[in-house]
Image (cartoon, rainbow, N blue to C red):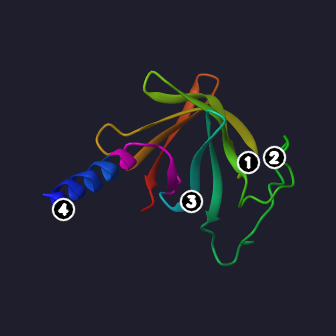
Amino acid sequence: MKTLLLSLLVLAASVIHSQTVLGKWKTIDDETGKEKSIVEIYESNGKVYGKIIQLFRDPSEDQDPYCDKCDDDRKGQRITGMIIVRDMTLKDGYYQGGTICDPKNGKVYKCEFWLSANDPNKLELRGYWGFLYRTQNWVRVS
């Protein structure tokens, strides 16, 4: 009986863990379909942030580049370790109110994201520039 109860608790904990946006996510380029990076989403002081912890780059490219196109406090920072998602809060079932920086072009966009309704291991992230937006799908890293 104790073994069954313990098994149910472990199963419940894994289901609860898979329902959170916190954790590591593989970013996929929405234009090329190629893997770009691993971003760790974490909570700090009641807000959610995302930091690049690994880049996937062509061997001919600089493997640890700086953000030379950023024009805010990230300018000159290494992209690996950079906090690209800032100040997100949960409201009405999705995270919003913050921003995301695209180190490729240095631009900062308003941002929102949510877990896919069909798969809690997929994160749908949308960056806005005025009324225009771009959506990427990120995949949870086990």
- Quickly name the residue at label 4: 3
- Asked whether, in this view, residue 113 is left or right of residue 58, the answer is left
- Residue pushed farthest left? 1
Residue that protrudes farthest toward the bottom in the picture: 59
* Cβ atoms under marks 4 and 3 closer than 8 Å: no
Disc 1 marks which residue? 105
CA gap between label 2 and label 1 equals: 7 Å
N-terminal label among 2 and 3: 3
Label 2 amino acid?
Answer: Cys
The residue at the far front in this view is 2
Q: CA distance from mark 4 to mark 1?
A: 53 Å
Does 27 appear in magenta? yes
Which residue is denoted by mark 2 in the rendering? 70
Mark-to-mark CA distance, 3 and 1: 18 Å
Q: Amino acid at mark 1?
A: Asn
Q: Nearer the viewer, mark 4 or mark 3?
A: 4
Whichever of callouts 3 and 1 sits on the residue coming sooner in the sequence is 3
SS at badge 4: helix
Residue 23 percent location from the top left of the image: 51, 52
| Mark with earlier residue (4, 3) | 4
As drawn, 108 above or below 17: above
